[in-house]
Amino acid sequence: LAHKCLRQLDDHKELTQDSFNYLLNLLRDAFPSKRYMFVSSDVDAKPFGFTNTDFVAPLYHHKTEQWSIICVCFQHQSKENRGRPIVKAQHYDPDPRQDKGRHAEVGDRIRSWVERGHGRNVELKYSRV
């Protein structure tokens, strides 16, 4: 897999998902953050399989064959929200024209994941970065 990944990089080809995950695992080993870094997830996968901890996750969009990334933080008892928990999700998409496309799609998926895993009492603050 390392050779395949290097070949894709040398040939200036798009990385396949398995090559991307290989590089991500190398990065994850050196990631000095309190946030967990997931391997890539398909936006089309149902449902998102994220945990209840702070995390960073690359997302692969099959329709456009491009990547975006999401960073999620949990605030379990928030003063700004009268004691209700808040999930803050920030989505980065390298193509700013995708505000109504991929950004909206990821927002819908994250909203569904928050409600399914935490109930409707949790507020989601979703933004583009």
Image (cartoon, rainbow, N blue to C red):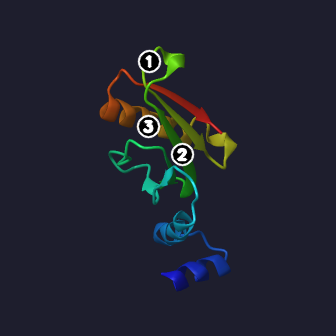
Q: What residue type is labelled 2?
A: Ile
Residue at disc 2, secondary structure: strand
Within-10-Å neighbours for mark 2: few <14, some 14–19, many 20+: many
Q: Does residue 100 appear to the left or right of 42 in the view shown?
A: right
Q: Position of residue 70 (x, y in %)?
A: 54, 45
Image quarter (top left, top right, bottom left or bottom right) of the C terminus: top right
Q: Is 123 above or below relative to 69?
A: above
Q: Name the residue under label 3.
A: 110
For marks 1 and 3, give the one nearer the viewer. 1
Quadrant in the picture for residue 30:
bottom right
Q: Does residue 16 appear to the left or right of 6 in the view shown?
A: left
Q: Mark 1 points at which residue?
A: 83
Q: Is 111 above or below relative to 66?
A: above
Check residue 70 in the rendering and tell me which mark sits there, or answer none: 2
Q: What residue type is labelled 1?
A: Gly
Q: Which residue is drawn at 36% across and 51% down?
A: 45
Q: Are marks 3 and 2 in contact (CB under 8 Å)?
A: yes
Residue at disc 3, secondary structure: helix
Q: Nearer the viewer, residue 27 or 99?
A: 27
